[in-house]
Structures are given as structure tokens and as C-alpha cells.
Amino acid sequence: MVVSCSSCSLAFSTQSSLNRHLKSYHNVLNNIISYDYKVWNSKCNECLCSFKFIKDLRNHLIEKHNYQVETVAQEFESLEDFNIWLSTEEESNNVQYVKARGQKKDVQYYNCNRSITSKHDKQSLKRPLKSQGSCKIETTCISQIKVDNNKDKILVTYYKTHYNHEIDVQHLRILSKDRTDIGVKLKSGVSVSRILNDIRDNISGTQLKRCDIITRKDIHNIKTAFNINCEEEGRRHTDDVISIDLWIQEQESCDTNCVLFYKKQGVDMGVLDKDDFCLIIMSKSQ
């Protein structure tokens, strides 16, 4: 792994060698360590180097490139108050943050949802892309929220400025309250077309929200999440196995039963294997 001196651009094979160089030639004990552009996810597009931590990239941009980073300090009485503030901030600015995993309870970080912060995120980019592209930007954004949870107060440092991407509503998740509202309407029998038309008719202002661009696919996903019956699509349940069982029960109770034979998976029956599925139907006209 190659590391570079930010003062004279000399390259070193190890960080310890760089540290000795900094102390001997530049009289520097603590310095932001920059690496080759391909090494870490936190990448500077101005001088094509990378950093191990988001905070190092942010400080580098401020110190070396005079990048203006808006920083906001907040104080809350409880985590509940913080979460209310966070939801309001996300909705009003069309941004979203994801809590980093594997952290101490007293200090937590929330990273911009566009950031790649792990190898798992990189693996997810290998899946087929959505029509709007992936929400991940193959690097990290410097916008971050640090939450210091002490016994008396919740102290928040909010680095509001984003980097390496534009603010795009199509890469946001639908807010929980909007998903719930749509789920309630679907359960009440409101059609998908009516829901979409109402959303389009109620768009106001110049700034679009994620809910304003909801698609039929989004509503289908909400149906699945809320386990809403999809009768208009010929399904009795969002789970296909349960849906078929319910349909078979309907057929058995009617005079025009078209089911000649039915075997579901997991049941031993005749010459068929336990994992086999078989459904034979025939109408009167046949």
C-alpha cells in the first residue's frame, strides 16, 4: 500500500516510513495521511488521492483546497429529539443519512446515504442497476453527522456540505410516513392510479420531494412490505405459495372447480418427490 507525503509528495511503502519522514524533514508529528487514489473510498477529485477516513478527506479539502464546509452544532435533550430533528433535516433538504455500524454507544456517526463505506457496498454495485442508477457513488461524501451521547445531553456536530455528488431525489428512500399513508390508502381500496394522480395533483413549490416521483413499482413494493392483498392482479396474497393455496380453497368450495390435481412442495404424494410442485386444471369447455 503506497502512502504519500502531503508536503513534498514523496511516496513510501508503509505508513511508519512516512511518519518518520514527516518527523525528520517536516517536523510534523500528526498529519493527514494520503494514499493512492484507488486505495480507499474517501477520494479527493482535486488531486487524485484517497484517505482512510471521511474526516481526513474533509479536513484535506478544507486545508489544501479551501473547500467551504458548513458545520452546524446542535444540542438535544434526548435521542428522540435528535431523531425528530434528523427526520426534519432530511425531508427539508432532500438528503438521507445512514447510521454506521459497529460503533461505540457513546459516539455514533451518520453518513450520507450516497457514500460507499464498506466492501459490502461495493459488492452491491455489481447487481443489475436500476433505471435511475445506483444511489451509491463509488466513493464517499464528506457530509456526516457525529452524535456524542453523554449522560446529560446529546451533542451533535453536523457537517452539512456534500461532495462528489448532486442532490438527487430519485436516490432517496421513500419516507416511512409516506409509505404508511400509501399503505393505508391501498388497504382502504384506493386504486394505484388514483394514488398516483393524487400525488401528481398535489405537487407544490419548486423543489420536488421523493414522494412526488413515486412510481407503480414503488407502490408494488409498498404492497409487498405491508402484505396487502393484490386481488386486482389475480393474487390472493403477496406470498405466491399462500396465494395458490387460497385459490385452491376457493375452487374446492365452488360448483365449477377446475382443479383436477394439486400437490404443493413439502408434501409426500405418490411417485412425485417431496420437493415437487404439481397443479393440473381443466375447464368445462376443455
Image (tube, rainbow, N blue to C red):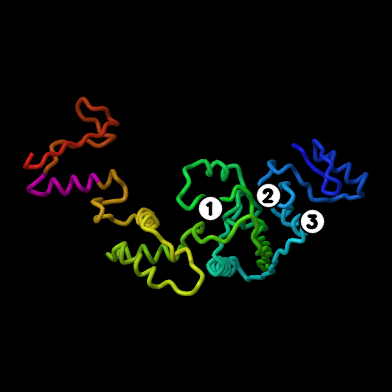
**Which residue is at 8% across, 47% downward?**
256
Give yes or no for contact between labels 3 and 1 (Cβ–Cβ under 8 Å).
no
Give yes or no for contact between labels 3 and 2 (Cβ–Cβ under 8 Å).
no
Residue 78 left/right relative to 278: right
Q: Which residues are magenta?
A: 244-257
Residue type (three-letter) at the residue carrying disc 1: Cys
Comparing 163 with 266, the one in front is 163
Magenta stretch, main secondary structure, is helix
Q: Earlier in the sequence, mark 1 or mark 2?
A: 2
Where disc 1 sits, the SS reads loop
Where disc 3 sits, the SS reads helix
Residue 135's disc number: 1
**Which residue is at 62% across, 58% downward?**
110
Q: Residues within 10 Å of mark 3 (few under 14, many from 20)?
A: few
Residue type (three-letter) at the residue carrying disc 2: Ser
Query: Percent position (x, y) of residue 149?
Result: 66, 62
Residue 104's disc number: none
* Mark 3 and mark 1: Cα distance apart in space: 28 Å
Residue beneath disc 2: 42
* Mark 1 and mark 2: Cα distance apart in space: 16 Å
Comparing 276 with 172, the one in front is 172
Query: Percent position (x, y) of residue 124?
Result: 52, 44
Residue beneath disc 3: 64
